[in-house]
């Protein structure tokens, strides 16, 4: 298992995580089997947004005696009222639900206290311009939550979070289909493939900018909805007209700037194994780029680098995708940010070492003029 730094939280999280929502429909024994296998395979981050009491108790019971091995994303504002889930900013209701979360998980702290589900401007104002945010800050001051995060499906709200100075990491919905879609207030539209019209191709500029902003601001991202509810596994349901594999979906998410972990959902230990197979998958098995580039519908824009890594190998061992990522982060600024330049200079091989053979260009599914970009990167960074 590979581990990544979750932005300014400094936490080293497994790049494959556990989104525990699906455990809600399973018994304690079935849920424990999933958690056990996840831990055995090196997964160390878990998201529990659910307010349903039984699933919280089952997770807590399964984690008993090994709490310190896990980083938990626990949500503030996800409540259980009269037998159903209710999202609220009512502080007293939030307090009761959060105390319940701690008690049922058998812990006295949550690593990542999540401002729950902010998808609209109205949601933002309800969370950040009310006593709710004071309660969240108090939890952090007391050490009851170690870091403040926020969950959202809307890149416009995620951008506000990244710029807020309060939010340290974001739980965000990422997959190649969602990334084509501009910001909307209604999550259901992401799952309505009728909204993916002809001509809609390439990553939406606001989403692309969000990933770069989070990378610059050191706001880490954990991913939800990496498989679009399984729709991307079915060519008939996929907006691309082709099916992707779990490994390809995971690789897409993990090649976005600032992404540290993908919180996939599992019904069985075997599904955990299928996700963790990403760690030993070949480059060909990870290759989503070739699939999308040749898809019959809604292909990505030619000339746009998606950091997929299909350009490898380089004869002088330049990590081309990483150079392109740092170049894109720096080029949009008035001057090169010191942190971006430091990361670039830490690379073992830099753009200035490019020999211009263009073998990488013959493998790029999107027709990126890589040699030209290497020249520009070398000039920009001075190496």
Image (spheres, rainbow, N blue to C red):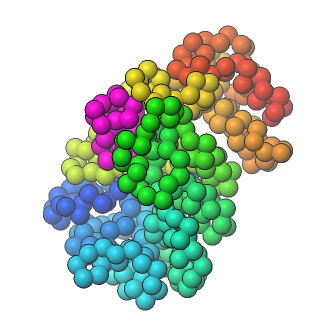
Residue 26: % across, % down: 17, 61
Work out which quarter of the rendered image holds the C terminus and state it: top right
Most foreground residue, 116 or 314: 116
Note whether residue 86 is visible.
yes
Residue 192: % across, % down: 36, 46
Residue 371 position (above or below residue 176):
above
The span shown in magenta is 226-255
Residue 114 position (above or below residue 312):
below
Residue 206 position (above or below residue 378):
below
Name the residue: 38% across, 60% down.
46
Report whether 73 appears left or right of 255.
Answer: left
Note whether residue 171 is visible.
no
Report whether 259 appears left or right of 278.
Answer: right
Name the residue: 62% across, 24% down.
303
Residue 243: % across, % down: 32, 30
Asked if the stretch drawn in magenta spans residue 240, the answer is: yes
Can you name the residue that lies furthest to the bottom here? 92
Most foreground residue, 342 or 129: 129
Quadrant in the rendering for residue 327: top right
């Amino acid at each position: 298992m590979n581990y990544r730094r979750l932005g300014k939280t400094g936490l080293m999280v497994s790049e494959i995580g556990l989104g525990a929502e699906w455990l809600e429909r399973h018994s304690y024994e079935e849920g424990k089997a999933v958690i056990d296998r996840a831990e055995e395979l090196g997964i160390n981050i878990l998201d529990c947004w659910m307010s349903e009491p039984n699933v919280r108790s089952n997770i807590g019971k399964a984690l008993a005696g090994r709490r310190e091995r896990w980083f938990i994303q626990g949500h503030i504002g996800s409540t259980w009222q009269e037998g159903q889930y209710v999202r609220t900013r009512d502080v007293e209701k939030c307090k009761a639900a959060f105390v319940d979360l701690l008690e049922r998980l058998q812990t006295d702290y949550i690593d990542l206290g999540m401002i729950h589900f902010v998808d609209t401007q109205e949601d933002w104002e309800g969370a950040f311009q009310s006593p709710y945010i004071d309660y969240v800050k108090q939890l952090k001051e007391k050490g009851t939550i170690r870091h403040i995060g926020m969950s959202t499906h809307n890149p416009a709200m995620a951008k506000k979070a990244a710029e807020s100075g309060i939010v340290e990491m974001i739980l965000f919905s990422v997959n190649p289909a969602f990334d084509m879609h501009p910001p909307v207030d209604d999550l259901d539209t992401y799952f309505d493939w009728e909204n993916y019209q002809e001509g809609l191709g390439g990553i939406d500029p606001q989403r692309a900018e969000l990933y770069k902003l989070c990378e610059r601001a050191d706001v880490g991202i954990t991913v939800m909805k990496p498989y679009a509810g399984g729709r991307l596994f079915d060519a008939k349901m996929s907006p691309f007209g082709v099916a992707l594999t779990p490994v390809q979906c995971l690789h897409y998410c993990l090649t976005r700037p600032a992404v540290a972990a993908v919180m996939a959902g599992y019904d069985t230990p075997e599904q955990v194994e299928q996700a963790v197979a990403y760690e030993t998958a070949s480059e060909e098995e990870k290759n989503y780029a070739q699939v999308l580039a040749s898809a019959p519908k809604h292909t990505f824009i030619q000339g746009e680098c998606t950091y997929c890594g299909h350009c490898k190998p380089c004869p002088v061992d330049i990590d081309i995708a990483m150079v392109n990522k740092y170049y894109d982060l720096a080029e949009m600024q008035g001057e090169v940010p010191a942190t971006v330049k430091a990361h670039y200079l830490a690379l073992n091989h830099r753009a200035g070492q490019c020999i211009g053979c263009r073998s990488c260009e013959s493998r790029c599914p999107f027709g990126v003029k890589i040699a030209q970009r290497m020249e520009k990167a070398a000039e920009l960074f001075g190496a």
